[in-house]
Image (spheres, rainbow, N blue to C red):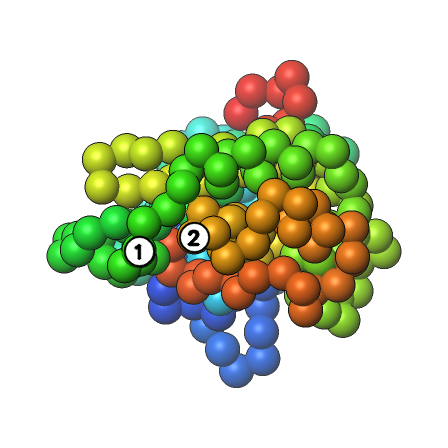
Amino acid sequence: MRYFMHLAYNGTPYHGWQIQPNAPTVQHTLEEALSIFCNEKINIVGCGRTDTGVHATNFYAHFDTQQQFDENQLTHILYKVNAFAGENIAVYRIFPVADDFHARFSATARTYQYHVATQKMPFRQEFVYRIFFDLDVEKMNAAAEILYQYEDFTSFSKLHTQTATNNCNVMYAHWDEIDNELIFTIKANRFLRNMVRAITGTLIDVGRGKITLDDFRNIIESRNRCNAGTSLPAKALFLTEVEYGDTKL
């Protein structure tokens, strides 16, 4: 049987989603909990691999088991896993899916948001990137639209990764001003390691007037990470949505 999990997590205390040697991760925490309460070794596959310190308000994962649980048993496991996982992980649902439905490979789109604070925010300081300068948001959105014209995002990828290709299909990229925050939302079929934070940092360079729209385009076409802007801190980045085509979870 294959089961899906819908969850969210505060990534601050974790070294990302994926299991790392001698470091706490979300995947390891959940695998340990499920292995205990399912009474067998459980391996979990996530819909993505968020980096150290990155958060997720919507995340999906699946696991396989030889057992078939009824609704009451799943409710009991859900309760136990949440108690074991602690305050920084919330598992909302555990539910059966088809054997070939895959948390990662069946996903058709993912959406991230990056939060930038334009003034002091004492109750959100752990989840925003504070700036001390003005930005031209209109110009930043003009640059964001340039992303639609390209597929190869090597310039915004962490170096020496094991991906077969650096091609991505960006479906949406836009800055919004909400209260005292600037929120950058980007949606694509897949993301490279460090891609969102590198794009966001480069777009902020556009907004500050450090680079032009033509410069931004040239950075993409150069396929050289050294030409792009600084990768911004992980604490302000959230995975907010994962889509599975016409399938509603």
Q: Are marks 2 and 1 in contact (CB under 8 Å)?
A: yes
Q: Secondary structure at mark 1?
A: loop
Left or right: 20 in relation to 89? right
Left or right: 241 in relation to 187? left
Classed neighbour count for the residue bearing mark 1: other residues with Cα under 10 Å, few (<14), some (14–19), many (≥20): few
1 to 125, vertically: above or below = above
Q: Is residue 40 visible?
A: no
Write the residue at 37% across / 46% down: 135
**Any mark on residue 174, and which?**
none
- Name which quarter of the figure residue 162 lies in: bottom right
196 to 179, vertically: above or below = below
Question: Which one is nearer the viewer's eye here, 59 or 199?
Answer: 199
Question: Which one is nearer the viewer's eye here, 94 or 198?
Answer: 198
Horizontal and vertical percent position of residue 207: 45, 47
Q: Is residue 205 visible?
A: yes
238 to 73, vertically: above or below = below
Write the residue at 22% across / 35% down: 179
Horizontal and vertical percent position of residue 77: 41, 46
- Name which quarter of the figure residue 151 lies in: top right
**Any mark on residue 208, and which?**
2
Left or right: 92 in relation to 226? left
Mark 1, residue position: 133
Give the residue type at disc 1: Phe
Q: Residue furthest top?
A: 246
Sequence order check, earlier mark of 2 and 1: 1
Which quarter of the image is occupied by the N terminus? top right
Write the residue at 49% across / 37% down: 139
Q: Secondary structure at mark 2?
A: helix
Question: Which one is nearer the viewer's eye here, 187 or 55?
Answer: 187
Left or right: 27 in relation to 66? left
Give the residue type at disc 2: Arg
